[in-house]
Amino acid sequence: DDGGVVRQPAFDGAAFDRVLPGLLLRVARSPAAGNDAPGYSLVDEAWPGMKNDRAGLLCAGRDPAFDWLITVGPATILDTAPDAGERPQFTVFGSCEPLDRVQAIANAPSQRGKPVSAIRLEQVRVSRR
């Protein structure tokens, strides 16, 4: 990894491997999840006291797995205990829109958190504001 910008689409066509109604969606980029790993990792940017207090786009980018979570609202279960002195394991990168579509995917039929039918990302667009 040379620290340069990667321009290949990392998540186009990837499948959601977890859907937890009212909480989150997960796309894991690893062979175990049926998706190829992207071939790079991200620096952990989480900090002590970081809170998942609203819907967001979160990432744990460590090889060999590369997980993206999309939370549909507050996800305090992802926060560490205040007295543990540990950082959360997911870095908050931003948000996903439109939120009603994210909520619909999170409420898709599932068994034990796994979608009954495949749900795939057609295309991911990243924008900076």
Image (tube, rainbow, N blue to C red):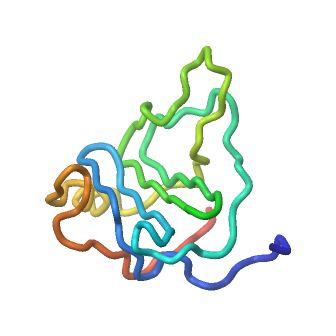
Q: Where is residue 12 in the image (x, y as percent from the top left)?
A: 46, 81
Q: Which residue is drawn at 83% across and 70% down?
A: 3
Judging depth in this view, the residue of 98 and 124 nearest the camera is 124
Q: Looking at the rendering, in which quadrant would you find the N terminus?
A: bottom right
Task: Please give left or right for residue 1 compared with residue 18 in the image.
Answer: right
- The answer to which image quadrant residue 61 occupies is bottom right
Q: Position of residue 120 (x, y in %)?
A: 33, 75
Judging depth in this view, the residue of 120 and 38 nearest the camera is 38
Q: Looking at the rendering, in which quadrant would you find the C terminus?
A: bottom right
Q: Residue at x 65, y 33 (%)?
A: 87
- 35, above or below 73, in the image: below
Q: Where is residue 118 in the image (x, y as percent from the top left)?
A: 24, 73
Q: Which residue is drawn at 44% across and 31% down?
A: 76
- The answer to which image quadrant residue 109 occupies is bottom left
Residue found at the far top of this picture: 83
Residue found at the far bottom of this picture: 8
Task: Please give left or right for residue 67 compared with residue 117 in the image.
Answer: right
- 58, above or below 53, in the image: below
Task: Please give left or right for residue 52 compared with residue 114 in the image.
Answer: right
- The answer to which image quadrant residue 19 occupies is bottom left
- 92, above or below 27, in the image: above
